[in-house]
């Protein structure tokens, strides 16, 4: 059992924000995130289960770990409609309910922005993957443009994590994945507008492998 992580407002608002993003292109990103995945997968911070619909039949089982109680309840309902078996568990990225090398794949989508410490979370992700296993990632990241990056850092140091359920907008998640010892095999950088009125936000989508 994880420490309770309750975000009563964010957990009720996020499904609406995410619905708009799905229509704007996130659905395609999720499809691409999971295409060709095989074997047993663990999804870290699964939210309300938006990825479940995109797991291919070659995935034998998904353990979806989500610490926020309301999102976990919604994920349980999404699991019942999923095309592959999905088991929901309480847990946090920094202490996953899984043994060493237990999984063929780890899925992290829009979650490494929210964990308290990326290095700790990525060490744990590395631990539960078998040698040669894949980390599939889809994350928003810090902008290359210095002026935008400066604004993102200010937001992270002030109101943004408070408003967005612990999310940070100025993280260099690609660098953190490499620092954790993964070999990045595929890495696409996308300027994505999650809603028509939102600014384009840099996202990374790709595959990294445990050596
Ligand atoms: C923006 S939502 C993304 C949800 C989902 N992965 C998706 O793609 O829609 C961020 C998620 O990270 C979860 N989260 C926050 N801190 C976490 C942690 N330490 N470990 C695991 N998940 C965490 C939140 O509860 C929330 O479900």
Image (spheres, grey):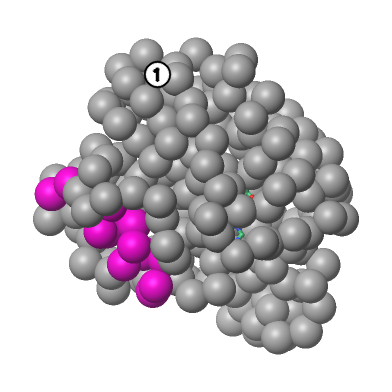
Is 109 located above or below residue 148 in the figure? above
- The residue stretch that appears in magenta: 119-131
Residue 192 horizontal/vertical position (percent): 63, 48
Residue 49 horizontal/vertical position (percent): 61, 34
Seen from the viewer's position, the closer of residues 41 and 96 is 96
Residue 17 horizontal/vertical position (percent): 80, 43
Say whether residue 188 is visible: no
Image position of 68 (left or right of 58): right
Residue located at (40% from left, 19% from top): 56
Say whether residue 39 is visible: yes
Image position of 159 (left or right of 31): right
Q: Quadrant of residue 27?
A: top right
Residue located at (41% from left, 55% from top): 96
Is 94 located above or below residue 18 in the figure? below
Q: Quadrant of residue 33?
A: top left
Residue located at (55% from left, 60% from top): 2
Q: Residue furthest front?
A: 1
Residue located at (78% from left, 49% from top): 11
Residue at the disc numbered 1: 56
Q: Ligand 1 closer than 8 Å to the CB at disc 1? A: no
Residue 24 horizontal/vertical position (percent): 71, 34
Tell me the chief SS of the magenta region: helix
């Amino acid at each position: 059992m994880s420490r309770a992580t309750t975000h009563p407002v964010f957990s009720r608002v996020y499904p609406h924000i995410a619905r708009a993003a799905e229509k704007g292109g996130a659905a395609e990103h999720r499809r691409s995130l999971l295409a060709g995945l095989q074997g047993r997968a663990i999804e870290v911070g699964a939210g309300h289960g938006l990825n479940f619909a995109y797991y291919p039949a070659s995935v034998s089982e998904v353990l979806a770990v989500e610490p926020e109680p309301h999102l976990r309840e919604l994920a349980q309902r999404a699991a019942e409609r999923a095309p592959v078996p999905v088991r929901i568990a309480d847990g946090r990225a920094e202490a996953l309910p899984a043994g060493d090398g237990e999984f063929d794949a780890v899925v992290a989508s829009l979650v490494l922005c929210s964990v308290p410490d990326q290095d700790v979370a990525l060490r744990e992700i590395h631990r539960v993957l078998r040698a040669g296993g894949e980390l599939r990632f889809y994350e928003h990241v810090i902008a290359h443009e210095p002026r935008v990056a400066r604004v993102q850092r200010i937001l992270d140091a002030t109101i943004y994590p408070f408003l967005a359920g612990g999310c940070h907008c100025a993280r260099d998640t690609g660098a953190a994945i490499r620092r954790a010892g993964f070999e990045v095999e595929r890495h696409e950088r996308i300027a994505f507008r999650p809603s028509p009125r939102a600014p384009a936000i840099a996202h990374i989508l790709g595959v990294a492998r445990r050596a």
